[in-house]
Image (cartoon, helix red, strand yellow):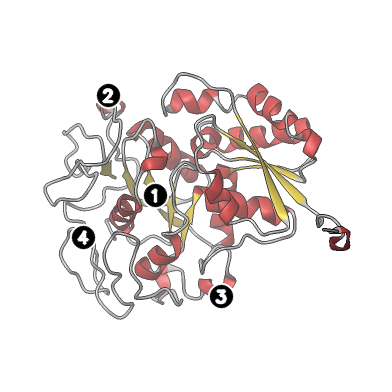
């Protein structure tokens, strides 16, 4: 069969992606990518260290990043992205800037990181008060809180899972449960947005549904990475209705306005996590009492503690191999404790 009439493949624009050696969600990055853009993914060398601050520092050394970018030069990407949240916030805001400069020099193209893209997204959405969900241990979570604080952003609540490996196996139900806890109104008031941290945490399908329930923008590590990289190409990320990539979804998103986030997803079911409360109804925090929407939302195990009140360094949670099958007193999968009980050691909690 003669196929010469097809004229050959269409033009292709490339995004180079440097990912940690244990990155398992290549397909999730592709889901935000338009058809005329290709991703060229490479990985940092393997090191026998579990997810921790030490690992974040090791995989973000400038020489490691430059070598990885060098492997992409033959396919001539127009931008390179370091798809790792902890590896790009571990050195603070100045450290993140230095990483971008090192990668840009190595590839002679613009460079971004996940944590830099996070701050860019917060500016885009006019977010000053942020709720966090992380799969990390308390020390890595604290480093993320400090990173966004350097950018002038207040953390209103933070839920973390205490994981050190195989983060990509966390189910959507657990992400949703943690998101509800982190976004619950606490002593510091309501958040303007929620961030789901870690590029190894699956988030694509839960973002629109969480926005419909929580009435604030929900952004994730992989989402902001692709949004920022594609922005450098002058094009847009693709995906279901969500505030970061669809400007029509931003009406009334600031929590202080009291306006609901519009969208067709309102009233639909969250993946494997039960029904979404309609916009006009009460907000139901995970395993907690029903509180009228105009009043504070109180998490079941106590109030959200102000940012910086995570467990002291000496109370690092024990090594955790996974969150599946663990339940707290309310039967919430993966939940083990909250920082409302500061004297208790815990593998998961919120601050």
Structural crowding at the residue carrying mark 3, measured as other residues with C-alpha within 10 Å and reported as few (<14), some (14–19) or many (≥20): few
> What residue is drawn where x is 51% and y is 48%?
221
Q: What residue does disc 4 label?
A: 298
Residue 289: quadrant of the picture: bottom left
Q: Which residue is mark 2?
A: 314
The local crowd at label 2, few if under 14, some if 14 to 19, many if 20 or more residues have their Cα within 10 Å, is: few
Who is closer to the viewer here, 328 or 21? 21
Image quadrant containing the C terminus: top left
- Between the C-alphas of marks 3 and 2, the distance is 46 Å
**How far, Cα to Cα, is label 4 from label 3?**
30 Å
Horizontal and vertical percent position of residue 311:
27, 34
Pointers 3 and 2 in contact (CB under 8 A)? no
Asked if residue 11 lies left or right of residue 333, the reply is right
**x, y (%) of residue 168?**
42, 41
Upstream in the sequence, badge 4 or badge 1? 1
Label 1 packing within 10 angstroms: few (<14), some (14-19), many (20+): many
Which residue in the structure is indicated by mark 1? 132
């Amino acid at each position: 069969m003669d196929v010469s009439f097809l004229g050959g493949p269409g033009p292709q624009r490339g995004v180079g992606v440097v990912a940690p050696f244990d990155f398992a969600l290549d397909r999730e990055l592709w889901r935000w990518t338009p058809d005329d853009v290709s991703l060229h993914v490479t990985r940092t060398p393997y090191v026998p260290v579990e997810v921790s601050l030490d690992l974040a520092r090791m995989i973000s050394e400038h020489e490691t990043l430059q070598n990885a970018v060098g492997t992409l030069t033959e396919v001539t990407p127009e931008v390179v992205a370091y798809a790792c949240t902890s590896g790009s916030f571990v050195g603070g805001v100045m450290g993140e800037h230095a990483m971008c400069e090192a990668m840009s020099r190595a590839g002679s193209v613009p460079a971004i990181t996940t944590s830099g893209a996070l701050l860019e997204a917060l500016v885009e959405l006019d977010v000053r008060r942020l709720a966090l969900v992380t799969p990390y241990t308390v020390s890595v979570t604290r480093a993320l809180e400090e990173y966004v604080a350097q950018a002038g952003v207040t953390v209103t609540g933070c839920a973390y899972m205490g994981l050190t490996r195989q983060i990509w196996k966390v189910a959507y139900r657990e992400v949703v449960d943690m998101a509800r806890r982190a976004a619950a109104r606490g002593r510091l008031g309501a958040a303007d947005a929620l961030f789901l941290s870690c590029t190894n945490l699956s988030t694509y399908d839960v973002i629109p549904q969480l926005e419909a329930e929580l009435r604030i923008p929900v952004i994730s590590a992989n989402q902001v990475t692709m949004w920022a990289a594609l922005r450098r190409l002058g094009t847009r990320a693709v995906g279901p209705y969500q505030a970061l990539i669809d400007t029509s979804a931003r009406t009334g998103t600031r929590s202080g306005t009291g306006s609901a986030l519009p969208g067709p997803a309102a009233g639909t079911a969250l993946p494997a996590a039960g029904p979404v409360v309609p916009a006009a109804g009460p907000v139901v925090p995970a395993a907690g009492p029903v509180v009228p929407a105009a009043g504070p939302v109180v998490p079941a195990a106590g109030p959200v503690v102000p940012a910086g009140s995570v467990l002291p360094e000496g109370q690092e949670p024990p090594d955790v191999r996974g969150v599946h099958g663990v339940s707290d007193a309310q039967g919430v999968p993966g939940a083990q404790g909250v920082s409302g009980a500061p004297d208790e050691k815990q593998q998961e909690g919120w601050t």
